Amino acid sequence: MKKKFIGSLLLLILLISSVTTANAAPMKDAEWENRKAYIEENIIALGSQDFETVENWLFLNGFQDVEVAQNKDGLIQPLSTNANVSITSFDAYYDTRSSRYLIKGWWIWKGTSYLDVSAGAVDGVMLAMYNSNFAPVSGYEYTSSNPTGIAVYDQNGTHYPNVGGLEDVSGSGLVWTFQDYYDWNNYVGFKGQVWAWLDKKPTDSTVYLKLDYRHTYSSATFNSGTISWSSGTKAPSISLSFSVAPQAWTATNIYKILSWPNN
């Protein structure tokens, strides 16, 4: 009961903070680092609860959804059916105060009965934008200087700092890897979120956004994690390389099609 009260108090403090800045003037470039740090600190803290809490807080702090377009060409695919992980939140937002975009996704396991008894090789998460030719989008390419982040939690919502990091940057896609493991009875990696900031929107009028999650469950020495681009044939996917091929799922993934606003 005490833990629940503390969590509610934290949320109340954060919401009060958001109200005091609701009518702030558009920020200058010099304020960007403070703005970014403030947003990331809060989405990490609120991520211990659920994705809806994070999203509601973003809306209270000057963010708008990027419009979701109709799936006229059938390129949006459902979640893979053989996985034990759900992708419950996956979106792009426009920050009206910094004039930047935030792309983020969230995963969560469907239950603790599916979890590994011991830690396997690392897991991978990919967040990528692509166009109707399955190629990197036009007018935007990630670089190592792009602000990105990953936050990993256990099933109780405890955040584990410094678990995971950015592994690959390729075109308009990013790959993170992290080591899932048991911390006593707490499964580190039960849920988590990844995000990336864009300082401008792609020039393609329609952009496909994909989140790709790959889980391994036997030991192997990790070599690298990259994005596999197959332009013209299929959407990008995670490619994880190990000393020997560990047991693994095929990726859990979801696609979304966006019409970027004229901001």
Image (cartoon, rainbow, N blue to C red):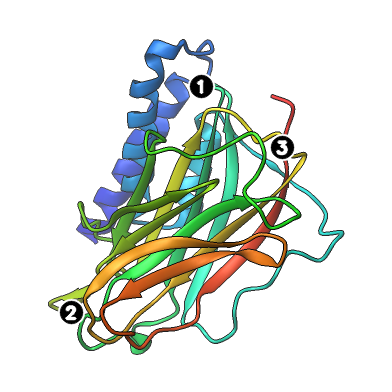
Q: CA distance from mark 2 to mark 3?
A: 43 Å
Rendered location of residue 219, percent (x, y): 22, 84
Mark 1 crowdedness (10 Å alpha carbons): few <14, some 14-19, many ≥20: some
Q: CA distance from mark 2 to mark 1?
A: 41 Å
Tell me: 205 left or right of 239.
right
* Foreground label between 2 and 1: 1
* Foreground label between 2 and 3: 3
Mark 2 vs 3, N-terminal side: 2
Residue at which label 3 appears: 260
Residue at which label 1 appears: 98
Residue at 53%, 10% (x, y): give it. Answer: 25
* Foreground label between 3 and 1: 3
Residue at 50%, 55% (x, y): give it. Answer: 127
Rendered location of residue 241, percent (x, y): 35, 72
Residue at which label 2 appears: 185
Mark 3 vs 1, N-terminal side: 1
Q: CA distance from mark 3 to mark 1?
A: 16 Å
The amino acid sitting under disc 3 is Trp
Above/below status of 247 relative to 151: below
**Looking at the image, can residue 188 be seen?**
no
Rendered location of residue 205, percent (x, y): 77, 39
